[in-house]
Amino acid sequence: MSRNLETAVLGVEAPFGGLTLGEAGGHVRALNGDRAVELTVGFPCDGFVEELTARVREATSVEEVVVRTKIAAHAVPPQVQRLEQVRNIIAVASAKGGVGKSTVAANLAVGLAMDGAAVGILDADIYGPSVPRMLGLEGERPRSADGKSFEPLRAHGLQASSIGFLVDTRSPVVWRGPMVTQALMQLLGQTRWKDLDYLIVDMPPGTGDIQLTLSQRVPLAGAVVVTTPQELAVADARKGIAMFRKVNVPVLGVVENMSAHVCPHCGHAEALFGEGGGARLAGEFDLPLLAQLPLSAGVRAATDDGRLVAPSEPDQGGDYRALSRAAAARLAGMARGAKTAFPKIVVESD
């Protein structure tokens, strides 16, 4: 294969996220001389493979483009045991409640599934589990064949696990931190996940002991941080990014949720929570702004009804589909094995 052809193919911009195929970890080899190429990408692409092949043909003289998807498992530090049947775990965090993190996590997960990936979602918010309602699974209970592990529930093409499937969600969970951490690790390890490309973890708000323990004990491949434009939310999201960096978890990017309210009658957009907070946060940490998502009555209604936005609202769901594709491409482009061991904490006395 000629170097010029390889450079041309890998220099094609993917249909999302502003990355080239090379930056997104793509590989290419010649077929039938240089008249056809096989492009291997590390992200799901069922929903846009035609657009992808058209871009490659436009940039080159090849007659045929064969696209294959190979979603690799990213390296984890030696102190953390990899979870069987799960290739990559992505945390969705905000460090602050009320910014729509769970809505983003659920639609990110379903967007990946719609593009052909095998995806699960773990609701790690013990005190306020919302995934059962968003997936239309309220009142459902998982099955256990051996009394020690249980099958994930399924909805919208996702495998799902939540404390909300195991307790009465009408009553508060009055547990101290160690109990919560133990429950989360049991949910993660005792759910019989089935050959997942991605497991999305909807993290609880905050940057305390629970969040830190999860970040250190769960083999995270990357994290997505959600904020609203206002400075109060940005200030907490800033702490969340700093936490992930302290434990060497790569942050894939920032999502600005509730970026503007869109009037359902006239289409007028108004920035109710200010402007530019997500972009400023991303710029401060040299991270991509993965998406700016609107505050919309349709999003609220779909979430409350257990329909989700990505599969049920084509116009508004496009923003979430673009987010899932950008996050997957960023993860695919990260160097395998680049993660280092967690820092050793040394306590010194005077």
Image: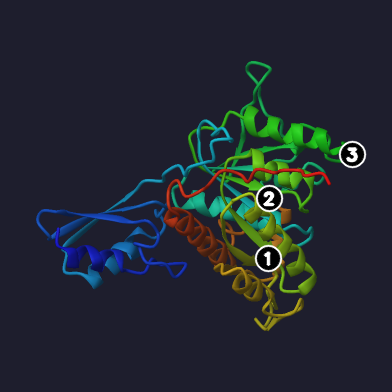
Cα distance between the residues tagged 1 and 3: 29 Å
Would you say the residues marked 1 and 2 are in contact, meaning their CB atoms lie under 8 Å apart? Answer: no
Residue 218: x and y in percent read 62, 39
Q: Which mark is residue 171?
A: 3
Q: Residue at x 37, y 67 (%)?
A: 20
Horizontal placement of 263 versus 199: left or right? right
Q: Is residue 307 above or below residue 150?
A: below
Residue 331, relative to residue 191: is it above or below?
below
Residue at x-position 45% and y-position 46%: 337
Identified at 68% across, 29% down, the residue is 142
**Residue 153 appears in which quarter of the rendering?**
top right
Question: On residue 318, which mark appears?
Answer: none
Circle 2 crowding by C-alpha within 10 Å: few under 14, some 14–19, many from 20? some
Tell me the residue that label 2 is attached to.
306
For the residue marked with disc 2, what is the amino acid?
A: Gly
Upstream in the sequence, badge 1 or badge 3? 3
Query: Viewer-proximal residue, 309 or 209?
Result: 209
Residue 191 x %, y %: 62, 30
* Residue at position x 29%, y 62% in the image: 53
Q: Which part of the image, by quadrant, shows the N terminus?
A: bottom left
Amino acid marked by disc 3 = Ser
Mark 1 — residue? 298
**Farthest residue, direction left:** 33
Q: Earlier in the sequence, mark 1 or mark 2?
A: 1
